[in-house]
Amino acid sequence: MQMKKNYLFSFTVFLIAICLCPAAWAADHGAKAPKKVGILLVAFGSSQPSARVSFENIDKKVKTAYPEIPVRWAYTSHIIRKKLAKQGIFLDSPEVALAKMRDEGFSHVAVQSLHTIGGAEYHDLRRTVGAFKMLGGFQRIILGYPLLATQEDMQRAVQAVIESIPKDRQPAEAVVLMGHGTHHPANAFYAALMFQLQLNDPNIFVGTVEGYPQVDLIKELLLKRKIKKAYLMPLMSVAGDHAKNDMAGPEEDSWQSILTKAGITCVPILKGTAEYDSFVAIWVSHLQGPLSHFN
Ligand code: CO
């Protein structure tokens, strides 16, 4: 995934969107608009059809929890949106989605991050939400936490990981989670999660593709414990490109290849965290905070 986001582009789109709907913004000068609450779900996005299961599951759970509130979607990745547009699937950026919601007369919007940690993308989204707040686009606009934010989230995530492990896995076999990883300071969440997982089960490990800990360190830890078999699972909402290629791909530098070469039998599980209800419940519960402020 391309983590580097083009801010100038996003902000330009945002400004254009504002300019395109002056009537909506001018409406603020008159009487207060009637209350209309909406939810905007924001993911990085994925162009893989296998990712759709994850997003459909989240969509269903949010609509079940809040049947009376309209739900909109946005993908932060420009590249993914461009790829999907070529297939005739059109997703908005958060900026455009919010401008449209403003135009539709939403007065209160809960923006829910579907990210795993509060990393670079989450903070990009914070800035977008902040810009709309600053411009007075809505009476209230609040951003919900990503999957792992509070200590309670960490404890719930530990339970969700344990529940998602295949039943035939033996205690002497490892479970290796593959997080995305980031240059952002929030990368520390991955090692923090591993620590808390290992308090429950010493053979669960968390590595990342682009941050710390990397697969080489995970390999060393597995060899030190004389692990012979490992279940590989993505710690990402979708089983997309990273899960298929970096985790379980045939290339020499995939996690499966690296660990297999070290004598560890690998069982890759190609399921994103958002395919498990116990993970989705954490994201959905994060909507409670923003929505409770709208009463
Ligand atoms: Co990526």
Image (tube, rainbow, N blue to C red):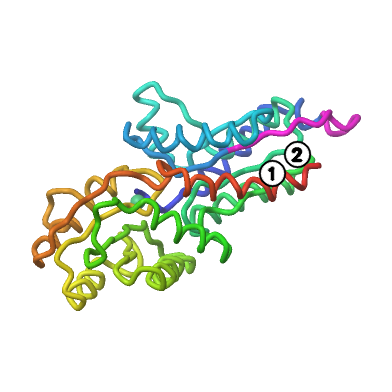
Amino acid under disc 2: Phe
Q: Give the range drawn in magenta.
A: 27-40
Residue under the image location 73 percent in, 33 percent down: 37
Residue under the image location 37 percent in, 51 percent down: 164
How many neighbours does mark 2 have within 10 angstroms: few (below 14), some (14-19), or many (20 or more)? many
Residue under the image location 74 percent in, 38 percent down: 108
Amino acid under disc 1: Phe
Numbered disc 1: secondary structure: helix
Question: Mark 2 and mark 1 in contact (Cβ < 8 Å)?
Answer: yes
Count how many numbered circles sit on residues in the image: 2
Mark 1 / mark 2, whichever is N-terminal: 1
Q: Residue 31 colored magenta?
A: yes
Vertical relation: 212 (above or below) 29 = below
Q: Which mark is residue 138?
A: 2
For the C terminus, the image quarter is: top right
Numbered disc 2: secondary structure: loop
User: Which sits in the foreground, 106 or 258?
Assistant: 258
